[in-house]
Image (tube, coloured by chain):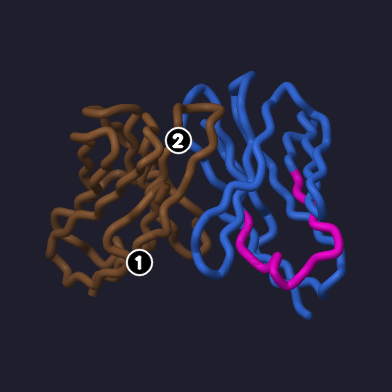
Chain colours: A brown, B blue
Amino acid sequence: NAGVTQTPKFRVLKTGQSMTLLCAQDMNHEYMYWYRQDPGMGLRLIHYSVGEGTTAKGEVPDGYNVSRLKKQNFLLGLESAAPSQTSVYFCASSYGGTPNEAFFGQGTRLTVV
Amino acid sequence: AQKVTQAQTEISVVEKEDVTLDCVYETRDTTYYLFWYKQPPSGELVFLIRRNSFDEQNEISGRYSWNFQKSTSSFNFTITASQVVDSAVYFCALSGGNTPLVFGKGTRLSVIA
C-alpha cells in the first residue's frame, strides 16, 4: 500500500497563478485533512473532510479551496497564489475522527515568488 | 478551544543523555486524545503514540516513555540514552470531540555525537 500520496512534491509559482495540490489515499479512510507547516508555527489545519462530498474549514482557510469528489482523493486549490502561501503542505487521512491517528503524506514544498 | 503548547523550541543534547520534551494542553472536552509525532530531517510525519484522557498510566516503549498527568494538563515525552537518529522535530497534538488534530509548534531535538 502506498498510504497517502501527494502530488507534486515541489512547485514554484508566480504571484497570482493558480494551482491544485492532489492528495490520494489507498487506506479507505473517511477523513482527510490539509495542513500547512511554517517555521515556528507547527502544523495548522487549512480544510478537512469527513467523507466524500463534504468539506469544512480549519484554522487558516482563507485563500484556499478544497474538493472531495471521490473518497480517496482530496484536492487543495490556490486560486491566486500569494507569497504568504509559501509553505510546506501536508495531506493526511484517518479512519475516522477522534481517536484515530492521522497518516501523513510526504509533503509538498510550495514557493510563491 | 483546544490548544497545545510546546514551550521548548530547540533542545540540544549529547548522545546517550536523557531528554524530556514538554507538552501542555488545554481543552474543555472530558474525552480527548493526545498524540506525539516525529518529523525526521527527511520531512515525513511519523506517528509515535496515542493516549486517551482516561488512562494516566505511564507508557514505555524501548527508549521512549510518556508521562501523562491530567492534574497539570501535561503529556511529556522522554527519550532515554538518546541517539543521533533521534534528531528530529517532535510534535505533540490533541484531538477531542471528534475534531481534527491540533498541533503544538514542535520541539527541534538535536543529538550530537
Q: Which chain is disc 2 placed on?
A: A
Does B92 sit left or right of B1 as displayed?
Answer: right
Residue at 76 percent across and 46 percent down: it is: B76
Q: Can you tell which of label 1 and label 2 is closer to the viewer?
A: 2
Q: Nearer the viewer, residue B65 or B106?
A: B65
Residue B18 sits above or below residue A52 on the image = below
Magenta stretch: residue B85 in it?
Answer: yes
Residue A53 sits above or below residue A36 on the image = above
Same chain for mark 1 and mark 2? The answer is: yes
Magenta stretch: residue A54 in it?
Answer: no
Q: Which chain is disc 1 placed on?
A: A
- The amino acid at mark 1 is Arg
Does A61 sit left or right of A35 as displayed?
Answer: left
Report the magenta residues as a range: B76-90
Residue at 23 percent across and 75 percent down: it is: A113
Residue A38 coordinates in the image, percent (x, y): 44, 61
Q: Which mark is residue A94?
A: 2
Residue A74 sits above or below residue A98 on the image = below
Residue at 69 percent across and 69 percent down: it is: B85
Q: CA distance from mark 1 to mark 2?
A: 22 Å
Q: Which mark is residue A109?
A: 1
